[in-house]
Amino acid sequence: MGYSIAVVGGDGTGPEVIREGLKCLRAVDDIYSLDLSFTEMDLSGDRYKSTGKLLEEEDIATLKAHDGIYLGAIGHTEVTPGILEKGILLKMRFDLDQYINYRPVRLYPNVYTPLKDKRPEDIDYVVIRENTGGLYTGVGSFEDKGTPEEVATQSMIYTRKQVERCVRFAYETAQKRRKKLTLCGKTNVLTYVYDLWERVMNELHDEYSDVEIDYVHVDAVCIYMVECPERFDVIVTGNMFGDIITDLAAVTQGGMGVAAGANINPEGLSMFEPIGGTAPNFTGLDQINPMAAIGAAHLMLDYFGETEAAKALETAKISVIQTMDSMAAGKMGMSTSEVGDRVVEALQSTTSKNV
Ligand code: IPM
Ligand code: MN
């Protein structure tokens, strides 16, 4: 038994935050005997710069020999935008068919939110972003490139199957929560793609009739996320809108220092990551907040079905968050490694009290 985890620190502050996450996972393993094993893999902008390698067939084969992927961040200031994103991160999501991007949005107590008068109980929802299709499909072209007559296109493509499996997952997520599902779309302009999404949501409703459904245009979703986030339980949306609204959502829950996400293939191999990126200005300073990476670690445990261990890690994380000055890098009132150490201590002391 046990769980084998492929660990990809990646670039920038990725390895630093993953180191703290691993510290916590090892501590959880000591307490709950989960028999976790870790394989470090070098997939990064640095490797690309020195070898020209992105995510290669043999890397995918190695990844597939594991039960989960724990990833820091991938990006390099000296590599043209798009190469690493498409060649490593998006390729992983696509090739492993991780069709759900699962983003919990939860404001923990005593974390600063720019939303005036909103409390933790007001900001507690999940965004289910479709993760393999839409504008990310990469279908597009230039015509007459570089001329005054140039035309550039990029297609938003969705098959019914892609939409259906994502909407089902969202319904099932809602059934485990407060049973409310909101489709975030743009049916007034994207009259093909979001028409399909809306029809699929309505057609499937018969099978999930205990879930209340709601449709909101993406621009209005942005308003509600700021003015009344309490109206959301589960939001489901396509890839591009999901990318955008989850960054806005992250800011409302305390920023990139706390926001984590899971790239899920419910029938296959899933990947868990902090969503903050490589933070090049903070690399190597021991100042970056590892809480998002620790959040990705408990998302992974939860996904493995290790609910109690996941809960314990999240509880320890929340208790340490209470003692931090800020969630922002460099302003935490403690170093990156100290955050990890304190979460480990909190985990050990709370769980030993319970035994
Ligand atoms: C994210 C990121 C990626 C995306 C980038 C790095 C390609 O912004 O995970 O949200 O757009 O999906
Ligand atoms: Mn993004």
Image (spheres, rainbow, N blue to C red):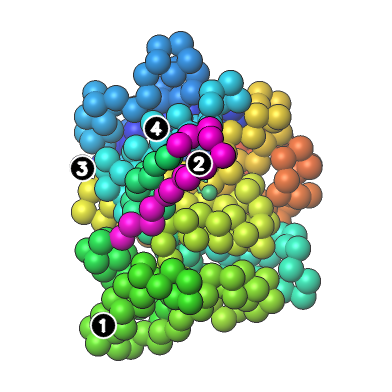
Secondary structure of the residue carrying numbered label 4: helix
Q: Nearer the viewer, mark 1 or mark 2?
A: 2
Residue at the disc numbered 4: 88
Residue at the disc numbered 3: 1
Label 1 residue near ligand 1, CB within 8 Å: no
The amino acid type found where label 4 is placed reads: Ile
Which residue is at the front of the view, 34 or 283?
A: 283
Secondary structure of the residue carrying numbered label 2: loop
Label located before the other in sequence (3 or 1)? 3
Q: Nearer the viewer, mark 3 or mark 1?
A: 1
Q: Give residue 38's quadrant in the image.
A: top left
Residue at the disc numbered 2: 150
| Residues at marks 4 and 3, CA–CA distance in whole angstroms | 29 Å
Magenta segment main secondary structure: loop
Residue 58 vertical position relative to residue 348 in the rendered view, above or below: above
* Residue at 42% in and 56% down: 239
Residue at the disc numbered 1: 203
Q: Nearer the viewer, mark 3 or mark 2?
A: 2
Secondary structure of the residue carrying numbered label 1: helix
In the rendered image, residue 123, in percent from the top left (x then y), is placed at: 61, 71
Q: Which residues are magenta?
A: 144-158
